[in-house]
Each structure stands twice: as structure tokens, then as C-alpha cells.
């Protein structure tokens, strides 16, 4: 009878606390090890496949397709835009009042009593195709779809604070309004009746979140996204500070301007420092420079995203050119949203 040596194998499985210990005879060692490696490979492959799917999705996002461009009559640049439909968009610059233009650049209507000299997003459009804008007295007005009636939706009652940018939420119907007092800033939320329901101004340590908020929008998860003077400041729906993005690499500097989000909850922002459109994910992780300074538009300044066609409208700060791009299709969006849900469940 021959002596049979025994060896101890420690099996460590990801996601399982501690380890499993088994003793095997030497002649069974190879088969036992093979079984263990097969199990680990199955676990690793599942996670790897999901990572590869995410990478494929990002590769699609990097492919920016130029659709067309238009020259907007009546403005010198495209500092801010409010998307209405595939053939209607509101455009404004720093000097002139908002102009509604069609897909060829022909002006259809002009607002005469809006706030002039604003560097930010002074108007937004709701689901009824009404224009909501800041007027010259810093009231919030609503222009009817037929552009025949203008009503004051929110009257300015505090002369200390000056409204600077506005955004209508498609998910809640609320109106998000960012303002400043030349020293600090804050975000206020109003319901569909024009009643104040929320104020966001400080983080959980009491520090001020904003200085001069220029543009404001909302992400698909309810996060409030603000293009501030030197950072993209993102808070959760309840008002808790989520993150502040200050450029890539982190802290390298940012001069954020026009901002929007897409169907995959990515945040797109125009950066005046690098003259690019930068893409970050919903948690503030840099993904790519989606668009760099181009000959057609020069420095990008305004952004609008069409959730129906997944087209991105980019306005120039150097001229009155508006370019339309597409970087995801409807199927990509549906697939990407499904994959994003699977990632968060890991």
C-alpha cells in the first residue's frame, strides 16, 4: 500500500465572505482545481461581458455624426437654446431677445421684453410648447403656444436675488430657477401653480454650493444640474450635494456654459477653457471630449438635446451658426438604459 499525500486548497470566491477549505488527495488535485477555475471563470465572464457591453456602448457614443447646420437670422451668436420640436428652437445671444427659428434658420417670432445682458439660460420650453423666460424686470413670464398671450407666472418679490437661468422639468412639470445676489447663488423649485416648494443653497456642511449659476437642467434620475461659474454642480432631487465637476483631469479648471443631459443620463457641458463639449456620467466621471472646437461653429456655447430623435443641437459663441449632431440612435439609447440598470444591480 502506497502513502497518499493530502494537500489543502483555499477557495476564495468573489462576493462570499471568508473562504472555503477542502482537503483533496494529490491525484484529485488537478480535477478539483479545474472545477474551481471553471466556476471562477463563469463569475468573471459574466462581469467581463457586462463591462464589454458598456465599452461597446461608449464606442458608439464616440461616433459623432454631423446632420446639418443652419445660420440663425437675427442673432450674433447662439449663447442659449431651448428645444421645441425637430423644426422649432428658441435661440438667444447676449444682446438680443429670444428668437424662435425653424430648421432653416428663418425667424418666426421674437420676444421683446426679455432680460437683456444675461450670460445664461434665460428661457425654457414646456410640454405645451410655451416659452418660459425671464423678463427685463426679472419676473418669470409664460408665452402661449400661439405667441399671442404673455402672462407673469412668477413675480419677483425679493430685490436681493436676481433670477439668472430657468428650466422646465419634463418629469415633474416643476420649474427650476437659479439666481444670485452677486455674492452667492441658489436654486429654487416651483410647482405648476407657481408656488415655491424647495430651495437648494448649501451642502451638508453648510457651505454654499453656487456662486453665479449660468445654466440649469435636470437629469433623468432627478438630479439638478447647474453650470456654475467654475464647476458643474449636481445635487440630488432632495437637494443633497452629489458632486461638483471641475474639469478633466480633476481640478484642471472649467468654465462651464451651455449644459444638457441625454437619454443615458450623461451630462454634456460646453467648456470655455478648452472650447470643447465634455461628456461626464451621472456620477461626475469624465467620459470624453464629445466635441472639440470646429471650423463650422468655433467655440461651442449652447446645447439642446432632442429626446425623440437623440439629436444634439450645438450653438456657436463665435457666430450665429447652429449645428445638429447625432451620437446615439433610439436602439442604442434603449440598450444603453437597459445596460445601465444591469450595472447598478451589480
Image: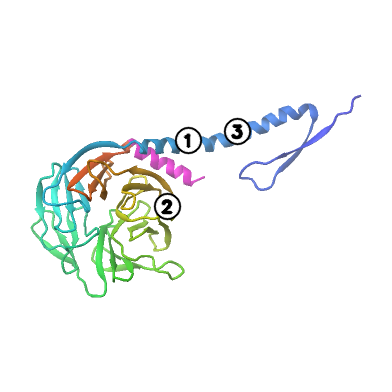
Residue 122, given in percent of the width and then of the height, sits at: 22, 60
**Residue marked by disc 2:** 284
168 above or below 6?
A: below
Is 142 displayed left or right of 191 in the figure?
left
Q: Position of residue 211 (x, y in %)?
A: 34, 66
- Whether residue 332 appears in magenta in the rendering, the answer is yes
- How dense is the environment of label 1, judged by Cα within 10 Å: few (below 14), some, or many (20 and up)? few
- Residue plotted at (18% across, 55% down): 93
Answer whether labels 2 and 1 touch (C-beta < 8 Å). no
Residue denoted by label 3: 41
Of labels 1 and 3, earlier in sequence is 3
Q: Distance between the residues labelled 2 and 1?
A: 21 Å
Q: Which residue lies furthest to the right in this view?
A: 1
The magenta-colored residue range is 331-346
Left or right for 344, reference 133: right
- Residue at image x 65%, y 32%? 37
Q: Please, what secondary structure does the residue beneath circle 3 have?
A: helix
Whether tag 3 and tag 2 are in contact, CB under 8 A, the answer is no
Amino acid at each position: 500500500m502506497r502513502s497518499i499525500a493530502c494537500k489543502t486548497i483555499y477557495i476564495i470566491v468573489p462576493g462570499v465572505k471568508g473562504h472555503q477549505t477542502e482537503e483533496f488527495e494529490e491525484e484529485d488535485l488537478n480535477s478539483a482545481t479545474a472545477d474551481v477555475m471553471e466556476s471562477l471563470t463563469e463569475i468573471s465572464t459574466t462581469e467581463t461581458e457586462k463591462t464589454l457591453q458598456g465599452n461597446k456602448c461608449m464606442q458608439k457614443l464616440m461616433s459623432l455624426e454631423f446632420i446639418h447646420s443652419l445660420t440663425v437670422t437675427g442673432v450674433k451668436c447662439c449663447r442659449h437654446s431651448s428645444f421645441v420640436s425637430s423644426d422649432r428652437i428658441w435661440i438667444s445671444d447676449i444682446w438680443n431677445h429670444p428668437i424662435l427659428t425653424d430648421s432653416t434658420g428663418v425667424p418666426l417670432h421674437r420676444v421683446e421684453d426679455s432680460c437683456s445682458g444675461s450670460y445664461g439660460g434665460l428661457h425654457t420650453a414646456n410640454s405645451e410648447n410655451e416659452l418660459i423666460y425671464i423678463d427685463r424686470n426679472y419676473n418669470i413670464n409664460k408665452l402661449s403656444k400661439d405667441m399671442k398671450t404673455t402672462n407673469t407666472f412668477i413675480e419677483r418679490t425679493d430685490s436681493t436675488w436676481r433670477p439668472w437661468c430657468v428650466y422646465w422639468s419634463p418629469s415633474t412639470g416643476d420649474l427650476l430657477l437659479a439666481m444670485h445676489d452677486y455674492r452667492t447663488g441658489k436654486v429654487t423649485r416651483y410647482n405648476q401653480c407657481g408656488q415655491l416648494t424647495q430651495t437648494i443653497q448649501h451642502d451638508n456642511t453648510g457651505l454654499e454650493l453656487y456662486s453665479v449659476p449660468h445654466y440649469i437642467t435636470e437629469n433623468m434620475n432627478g438630479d439638478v444640474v447647474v453650470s456654475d461659474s467654475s464647476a458643474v454642480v449636481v445635487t440630488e432631487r432632495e437637494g443633497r450635494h452629489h458632486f461638483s465637476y471641475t474639469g478633466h483631469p480633476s481640478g484642471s479648471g472649467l468654465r462651464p456654459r451651455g449644459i444638457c443631459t441625454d437619454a443615458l443620463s450623461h451630462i454634456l457641458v460646453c467648456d470655455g477653457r478648452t472650447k470643447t463639449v465634455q461628456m461626464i456620467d451621472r456620477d461626475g466621471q469624465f467620459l470624453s471630449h464629445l466635441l472639440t472646437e470646429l471650423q463650422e461653429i468655433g467655440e461651442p456655447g449652447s446645447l439642446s438635446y432632442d429626446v425623440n430623435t437623440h439629436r444634439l443641437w450645438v450653438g456657436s459663441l463665435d457666430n450665429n451658426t447652429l449645428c445638429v449632431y447625432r451620437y446615439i440612435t433610439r436602439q442604442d439609447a434603449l440598450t444603453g438604459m437597459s445596460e445601465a440598470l444591469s450595472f447598478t444591480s451589480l
